[in-house]
Every structure is written in C-alpha cells, then in structure tokens.
Image: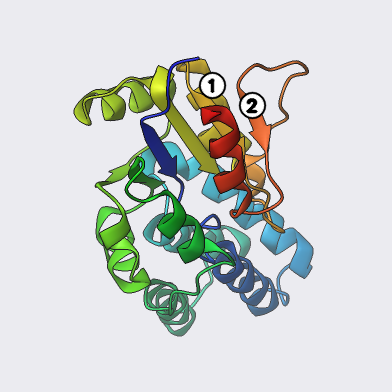
C-alpha cells in the first residue's frame, strides 16, 4: 500500500449536521398536505420526486425546495395556493440559513491529523450554500483544499488527487455515505472509510460487498486518527 498523503472528509453528516434539517422539512411537508393524502404518502411522493430531480437539479436545498413545490402541485392536483407555495419557499430559505452544528470529535480529529497529511474537504451540493457552510463551520483553516462537486465518482477522486499533486493510491476518503464517499474511492484505488451516522438518506444507501479491499469502518470520526496511524505503521 502506498504511503498516505491525502486524507479527505465528506462534510454533511460527517463533520456537521445536515439531514436533520431535511427530515424536519419533510415531516412539515407531510403535515401541510395531510388534507390531500396521508402524511406518509405525501413524504414518500416527495422523496420519489426529489430522487428523480437530482439528475436535473443536482443535490442540495434548492433542488429539495423545487421538489417540494412540484410535489405540492402533484398531490393537490394543481390546486395548491400561492400562500402555500410561499410557505414552501420560506422553508427552503430557513434550511439555507440554519446554524452549523459540528458533530462530536471533529476539531480534535482535524487537529491531530493536520500537519502530517494534506487534509481535504470534498462535498456535494449547491456551490453557494456549501461555501457558506464551510465558512460558518470555522473549519476551513484545517483544509488545504475544499472541493465542492456535483457528484462523487471514481474519476472525481482521480481529478482531485491529481490537482493536489498526489494519486488516489495515496488517498483516504472518510464519510457517512457508502455510495458516495466509500465505494467510489475504493474503485479509484484509494481507501474508503465509513463513518456511520444515525440517519441515512435513502438515495445514499448502499451495501459494501463482502471482502472489499481497502474498506474500513470506524465508530465515529475520532477513529480516523487511530486508523491512519495503524495504516502508517
């Protein structure tokens, strides 16, 4: 195994809370349209619409807000009123403006690794919103590079590694998504580390095939430090 050079972290639900805000908005959406269909059905329809729209709108709050409006029109048979549409837009704005709440062990982990490795942050989503979250988190100074991408695929990681004068064979990617953070990194020839989070978006759910090489799982972010030291040793 090549000596590690780059250690990359996902952002949402790896470094700070994110999905809880989408979950709360989904539940509020279900309640708002419970006069048309049962809450669970409204939420399921929203999730299906959102998943379908990713290829057009990408990831993030803006895409989610458009999907809420589209689902509202669909569920109501076109009868949704302007006041309700305005409320959905306000929900989207609130999601864009929420405070950043770091997850446990984040700063301790970054401090322990900084200086010995090039630290990168690699996140999907809307450019403006993700940039705002990175700045608001107070973590930007730990990273030699912040990469905001439309999707995470093996070629994405190859490009990023090359841009930072390294290779994916010398790269570790840690995150809460098997589908986006772990398997594409392994396919690119690097190390994928799964950091479980209590919630998982259905679109990001994936199983790791048995006997997958260069796959690790840690209990929480603090486990990255011991893992990296073990790999180095």
Q: Is residue 99 left or right of residue 43?
A: left
Q: Residues within 10 Å of mark 1 (few under 14, many from 20)?
A: many
Is 209 situated above or below 42? above
Near-viewer residue (136 or 2): 2
Give the quarter of the image for residue 133: bottom left
Number of marks drawn: 2
Image point 56% across, 28% down: which residue?
233
Image point 48% across, 36% down: which residue?
173
SS label for mark 2: strand
* Residue 77 appears in view: no
Residue 144 percent across, percent down from the top left:
25, 47
User: As drawn, which residue projects farthest toward the front?
Assistant: 233
Image point 47% across, 32% down: which residue?
172
Q: Is residue 187 left or right of residue 153?
A: right
Q: Which residue is mark 2?
A: 215
The residues tagged by marks 1 and 2 sit, at their Cα atoms, a distance apart of 7 Å
Residue 164 circle label: none
Residue 59 percent across, percent down from the top left:
42, 48
Q: Residues within 10 Å of mark 2 (few under 14, many from 20)?
A: some
Circles 1, 2 touching at the beta carbon (< 8 Å):
yes
Q: Which residue is mark 1?
A: 186
Residue 74 percent across, percent down from the top left:
57, 57
Near-viewer residue (28 or 14): 14
Near-viewer residue (126 or 119): 119
SS label for mark 1: helix
Is 52 situated above or below 220? above
* Residue 108 appears in view: yes
Residue 132 percent across, percent down from the top left:
28, 67
Q: Is residue 141 left or right of residue 211?
A: left
Image point 33% across, 71% down: which residue?
138
User: In terms of sequence position, does the residue under pointer 1 or pointer 2 come before the other?
Assistant: 1
Near-viewer residue (180 or 60): 180
């Amino acid at each position: 195994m090549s000596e590690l050079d780059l250690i990359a972290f996902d952002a949402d639900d790896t470094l700070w809370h994110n999905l809880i805000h989408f979950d709360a908005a989904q539940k509020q959406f279900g309640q708002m349209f419970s006069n048309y269909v049962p809450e669970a059905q409204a939420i399921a329809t929203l999730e299906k619409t959102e998943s379908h729209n990713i290829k057009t709108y990408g990831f993030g709050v803006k895409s989610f807000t458009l999907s809420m409006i589209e689902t509202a029109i669909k569920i109501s048979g076109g009868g949704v009123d302007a006041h309700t549409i305005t409320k959905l837009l306000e929900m989207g704005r609130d999601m864009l403006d929420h405070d950043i709440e770091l997850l446990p062990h984040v700063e301790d982990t970054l401090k322990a690794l900084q200086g010995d490795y090039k630290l990168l942050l690699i996140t999907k989503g809307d450019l403006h919103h993700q940039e705002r979250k990175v700045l608001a988190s107070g973590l930007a100074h730990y990273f030699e590079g912040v990469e905001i991408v439309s999707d995470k695929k093996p070629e994405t990681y190859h490009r990023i590694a090359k841009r930072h004068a390294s290779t994916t064979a010398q790269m570790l990617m840690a995150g809460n998504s098997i589908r986006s953070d772990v398997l594409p990194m392994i396919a690119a020839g690097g190390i994928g580390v799964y950091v479980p989070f209590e919630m998982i978006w259905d679109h990001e759910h994936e199983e790791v095939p048995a006997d997958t090489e260069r796959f690790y799982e840690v209990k929480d972010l603090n486990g990255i430090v011991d893992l990296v030291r073990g790999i180095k040793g």
